[in-house]
Image (spheres, rainbow, N blue to C red):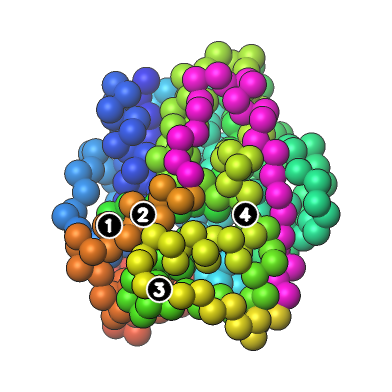
Amino acid sequence: MRVLVTGSEGYLGTVMCGVLSDAGHDVAGLDSGYFIGATLGPEPSRPPTVLVDLRDVTVDHVRGFDAVVHLAALSNDPLGNFAPKITYDINHAASSRLGQLARDAGVRRFLYASTCSVYGASRGAELLDEEAPLAPVTPYAVSKVRVEDDLHDLADDDFEPVYLRNATAFGFSPRLRGDIVLNDLVASAYLTGEVRVLSDGTPWRPLVHARDIAAAFQACLEAPRGAVHDRAFNVGMESENLQVSQIAEIAAAAVPGSIVNITGEAGNDPRSYRVDFSRITRAVPAFRPEWTTTRGAVELHDAYRQHGLTIEHFRLWFTRLAWLSRLQEEGRLDRELRWVGT
């Protein structure tokens, strides 16, 4: 298929483009360009890419594609809380508009990167499947719920939206994100010798490797319409539902000599949920996740050593809020996160 990947220069996008290209698809990218240059190791190879703000996309940008893989978003809760209006403008309004443009352009399949954080305030011990009540607690998660609803309204015989609710991502990507839990804790162990957890360590988090996310998108891209049309899928595996304290121990075990320090100073985090991932493997048998958190922690430690990660780079280059704030301070981005002079 001819596939457009939005957010192609980001953490998941650089991995996604490689996986889909290796599977034989004709891949093109669309990206705002925010994180070009924030790279650990060699620059990733990239498909033909259009640099355009998601808010400025036109129907011509999506015409001629069989499918759209929509990853582009302001990508985490701290950034969403820092700029809730812009999060709404990009993550909700521009994403729903992209769906409408794709349908108008004749794109058949639209794979949307949603999140398991739509279940965010669920404190019970039960595993949450795709029919569980949604309880988002941040602007980021709220935006994902709204886009799912909007894409559902667009679904018809010719337009096939699919909602992939990814667990919390981890693993190496050349466009590293340091503001997600395992990547952060392994870096802390490597750079300081200490895995510091500011919460009490009790919240549950489901985790999934970036390559397994890409494999799920590939499987849903290639699946029969009846298996995926207008359906939500949790993406991950049940064994990787872990408490933050367990994730901290895994991070420390991957970095010999490091210790765990659970301070509890940030109090009790309301975002706690365990997720059932059985639907996607029943509906799309081609998808079988492979990466455990333990294996991913070792991969991250090896990559950090190989590419010479430093504390300065980790904090300033690979934390999304810090990187975008720096671009604003340098006068390259304005208050609306638009490039100055364009």
Q: Which residue is mark 3?
A: 258
Query: Looking at the image, how many numbered discs can be counted on the residues?
Result: 4
Q: Secondary structure at mark 2?
A: helix
Q: Quadrant of the N terminus?
A: top left
Q: Residue at x 33, y 33 (%)?
A: 19
Q: Are marks 3 and 1 in contact (CB under 8 Å)?
A: no
Counting from the top left corner in percent of width and height, residue 222 is at 47, 19
Mark 3: few, some, or many residues within 10 Å (few <14, many ≥20)?
Answer: many
Residue type (three-letter) at the residue carrying disc 3: Ser
Q: Which residue is mark 4?
A: 242
Main SS type for the magenta part?
Answer: loop
Nearer to the camera, 233 or 193: 193
Mark 2: few, some, or many residues within 10 Å (few <14, many ≥20)?
Answer: some
Residue extent of the magenta highlight: 268-292
Judge left or right: residue 61 versus residue 132. left
Nearer to the camera, 291 or 144: 291
